[in-house]
Amino acid sequence: MATDLGPALVDVALAVEERGLDGLWLPDHTHMPVTRSVPYPMGGDLPERYKRNLDPLAGLALAAAVTERIRVGTGVLLPAQRDPIATARALATLDQQTGGRVVVGAGYGWNVEEMTDHGVDPVRRRARTREHVLAMRRLWEDEVASYAGPHVAFGPSWSWPKPVQRPLPVLIGGSPSRVLCRHVAEYGDGWIPLGARGLEEGVDAVRDAVASTGRDPAELEIVPFLGSGASSRHWDRCAVRGATEVAVDVPHDGSLFAALDVLGAAVAAWRS
């Protein structure tokens, strides 16, 4: 998670590419209310970095501008808290200008106060996320786009640029609830589970949901997010269960570049 206290993001992006890694993912929290009714999902105190993370769309634009190969992704974007028309255009611009290097990780969010500040009913956040992504799809894919739903509505409209990738990949992040499985099957190009165990426990449910709609589950991108302690043992477990990529957390402080050195060497050895 990139913060204002860590190394410059352009330097981080260059380091990721130079070490032979494949992508850079940034999370999305617009602000962090001091008072929270829901505890931090990973347990314990809220990490300091959650209070200071950079905007992912601006950050990924910086990262993409100084690199040529790596994918840049949101890990994860909170579509329910963002204007879908403006967000669709920003993501399309980024994909068009990078020649198709964007991947959109999308999640429902967990911080009740944060989403309430955006006018989002926490009970309806999953339905709102679905509509925002579906509306963005129309803007990305239709020459004249429109959408009508309880949460999003706009009449026939032009919106350019269009993404280079068709479709622009959207990966839904979270535990494999019935709602998430249904959403991946309806409008997702993949799934972001949390950890190797989350992948192992949920991948069959996600694949079954996708297959039930007539789609080929083998075409899904599956990108588990792993903690900083992940090793080749975890990568092996993910590969066995069909992961197409893994994302590994790294510290965003003075130890970041050393951590990337270690990670890059480990990945090179694992691939050989």
Image (cartoon, helix red, strand yellow):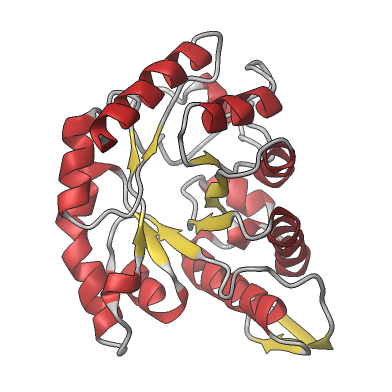
Depth check: 18 or 209 in front? 18
The picture places residue 12, in percent across and down from the top left corner, at 61, 25
**Residue 166 at what x, y percent from top left?**
58, 75
Residue 244, position in %: x, y? Answer: 32, 54
Query: Is residue 27 or residue 108 the one in the foreground?
Result: 27
Farthest-out residue, front: 272
**Picture quadrant of residue 183:** bottom left
Q: Is residue 30 above or below residue 249?
A: below
Frontmost residue, 170 versus 242: 242
Res 1 visible: no
Whether 6 is drawn above or below 53: the answer is above
Determine whether, in the image, residue 16 is placed left or right of residue 250.
Answer: right
x, y (%) of residue 92? 72, 64
**What is the residue that sits farthest to the top in this orientation?**
254
Return the residue nearer the eye: 164 or 104: 164
Which residue is at 43% across, 61% downward? 172
Q: How many numbered dots are placed on residues in this image?
A: 0
Residue 148 visible somewhere in the drawing: yes
**Residue displayed at 35% across by 44% down:** 246
Residue at 65% in and 43% down: 68
Judge left or right: residue 238 versus residue 169: left
Q: Is residue 8 above or below residue 80?
A: above
Q: Quadrant of the C terminus?
A: top left
Q: Is residue 30 above or below residue 16?
A: below
Q: Please report the residue visible at 55 percent of the width from the left and 13 percent of the height from the top.
A: 253
